[in-house]
Image: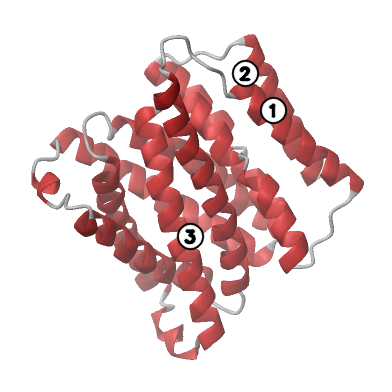
Amino acid sequence: MWLAFALGSMVFSGVTSILAKCGLRTMDSTVATAIRTTVVVAYSWLAVAAVGSAGEMGDIRGETWLFLLLSGCATGASWLCHFKALQTGPVNQVEPIDKSSVVLTIVLAFLLLGEAVSVLKGAAVVLIGAGTLLMVEKKKETHGAHRRSWIFYAVGSAVFASLTAIFGKIGIQGVDSTLGTAIRTVAVLVMAWGMVAVTGKCRLVRGASRREVLFLILSAAATGTSWLCYYRALQEGPASAVVPIDKMSIWVTILFSYFVFGERLTKRSGTGLCLITAGTLMMLW
């Protein structure tokens, strides 16, 4: 059953980036992250009400609370970096870097969770790393400083995403996955709106385009569904298998980026995508 939830997470995660990109045409990425998070929080707690797991909050241990909140903070940092990268860089190059978090997740799962790393899995990590490097191409029309900027944020998104998976795997044990997801979103909400306040961008919320807000709401709904599937899969299956499946959402994202934004893959980036896919399938095997 965990495999079905992992596949659901993959599909909805891929759609999330496309919808978010449509909502980031003119809106500040920090404000956009906060707006999306508000919707995700509402979505998550409605799910908790639907399954009736809110009453379990009193039984959650202190250690579990800590790791759920740490996972939420890591998610908030990853989102802030990810949507800044999406706003300034091409989707079909930002996503491969973001999805490369699977490499770091495997390393951390080995060090912290004791999950085994076989020779096959090690080879898969090499393929994913090589594929990611091939997919990140320098565009002639892009200035060097600007290019480095979105790459920096994309790398930050990957690092924090890997921490999200590890903290989430530890914190979700013994807790209903829907409730655990909802608790995490509260930490993300506080962090996101805190960044808006600290950076003095509250005034930008009122001037936000209604059309872009609509896309952000749809993106948030996709994210909420992806999360519910993802953490249910993490609860029932191994992190080293769930995370790679989730990262295959890159195919969904790249397919939609072609039809929606006209972004095409070159032979080099296409080869990189094949290497990433091969590496991911090797880890599942």
Q: Residue 70: which numbered mark, if any?
A: none
Question: Residue 217: x percent and y percent?
Answer: 27, 45
Amino acid residing under circle 2: Ser
Question: Residue 90: x percent and y percent?
Answer: 44, 24
Q: Is residue 251 visible?
A: yes
Which residue position holds label 2? 269
- Residue 81 to residue 19: above or below: below
Mark found first going from the N terminus, 2 or 3: 3
Cα–Cα gap, marks 2 and 1: 8 Å
Give the quadrant of the N terminus: bottom right
Which residue position holds label 1? 131
Q: Is residue 277 visible?
A: no
Q: Residue at x 46, y 51 (%)?
A: 78
> Is 35 placed left or right of 145 in the picture?
left
Question: Residue 243: x percent and y percent?
Answer: 64, 50
Which residue position holds label 3? 74
Amino acid residing under circle 3: Ala
- Residue 121: image quadrant is top right
Mark found first going from the N terminus, 2 or 1: 1
